[in-house]
Image (cartoon, helix red, strand yellow):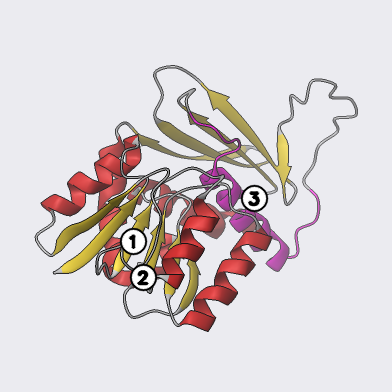
Amino acid sequence: MIRVAVTGAKGRMGSTVVQAVTDAPDMEVVALLDAGDAITAQSVNGAQVAVDFSVPTVTESNVHALIDAGVDVVVGTTGWTEESYARVSEHACRAGQAVLIAPNFAMGAVLAMKFAAMAAPYFESAEVIEMHHPGKVDAPSGTAVATARGMAQARRAAGWGDMPDATQTDELGARGGRVDGIPVHAVRLRGLTASEEILLGNEGEQLVIRTDSFDRASFMPGVLLGVRRVIGRTGLTIGLDEVMDL
């Protein structure tokens, strides 16, 4: 049995993780931690792996505390930067622990990001539209940022330059934000859970890759896979695809 602690356990995602781990035949929940709870070797209660679904303002400090507590960590909270990745990577390597940070745990979203990076070198234009419920606190989503970065990296490797765009004025920011040169647009709409459209275009053709999550349960198979696969690793792994043998 894999002993699991959950941080952010009282939140919407955290409580769903607790139920998924409880229902898994090879796991057991040994610690439930939330805002105000100290993360120590004692409070994690012998956990081998911790799952963090807290909030962006505290997720990095949670991860550092969990590493110090001798626990491997699976992180679904977004809001990470290159600098925060670097700090966690250094700490995890030094401590001999493993951290898996995934911008999305839904299998459809993970595969969509992979497909987008595979397709990007073959299309002149690319944009991302991410659509979430209005309770989401960060924009753009971590999934959209990861998608754009993956496509941009693939385009650079293929020798692509800037994408065609004759826009000269955009006082309202209607062209969206830019992630490594890829336009990213964020929608916050009542009734949505989590959706992403990846648009790729050449003259005369368009490829649309779309993924939709209608319920938080869609993320749980990926979370459980992350818990199983993080054990035995060392250092920082970014993206569930890195442990899926894709």
Rounded to the nearest angstrom, the CA distance separating label 3 from label 1 is 40 Å
Rounded to the nearest angstrom, the CA distance separating label 2 from label 3 is 43 Å
Picture quarter with the N terminus: bottom left
Contact, mark 1 vs mark 2 (Cβ under 8 Å): yes
Q: Compare residues 107 and 51 and report the one nearer the observer.
A: 51
Of callouts 1 and 2, which one flags the residue occurring earlier in the amino acid sequence?
A: 1
Of callouts 2 and 3, which one flags the residue occurring earlier in the amino acid sequence?
A: 2
- Rendered position, 166 above or below 245: above
Q: Secondary structure at mark 3?
A: loop
Q: Secondary structure at mark 2?
A: loop
- Residue identified by numbered label 2: 71
Contact, mark 2 vs mark 3 (Cβ under 8 Å): no
Left or right of 178? Residue 198 is left
Specify the farthest residue to the top.
190
Q: Where on the picture, by quarter, is residue 46?
A: bottom left
Left or right of 203? Residue 45 is left
- Residue identified by numbered label 1: 50
- Residue identified by numbered label 3: 123
Q: Is residue 148 magenta?
A: yes
The residue segment tinted magenta is 136-162
Q: Is residue 39 magenta?
A: no
Badge 2: how crowded within 10 Å, few (<14), some, or many (20+)?
many
Q: Secondary structure at mark 1?
A: strand
Badge 1: how crowded within 10 Å, few (<14), some, or many (20+)?
many
Rounded to the nearest angstrom, the CA distance separating label 1 from label 2 is 6 Å
Q: Is residue 217 visible?
A: yes
Left or right of 65? Residue 229 is left
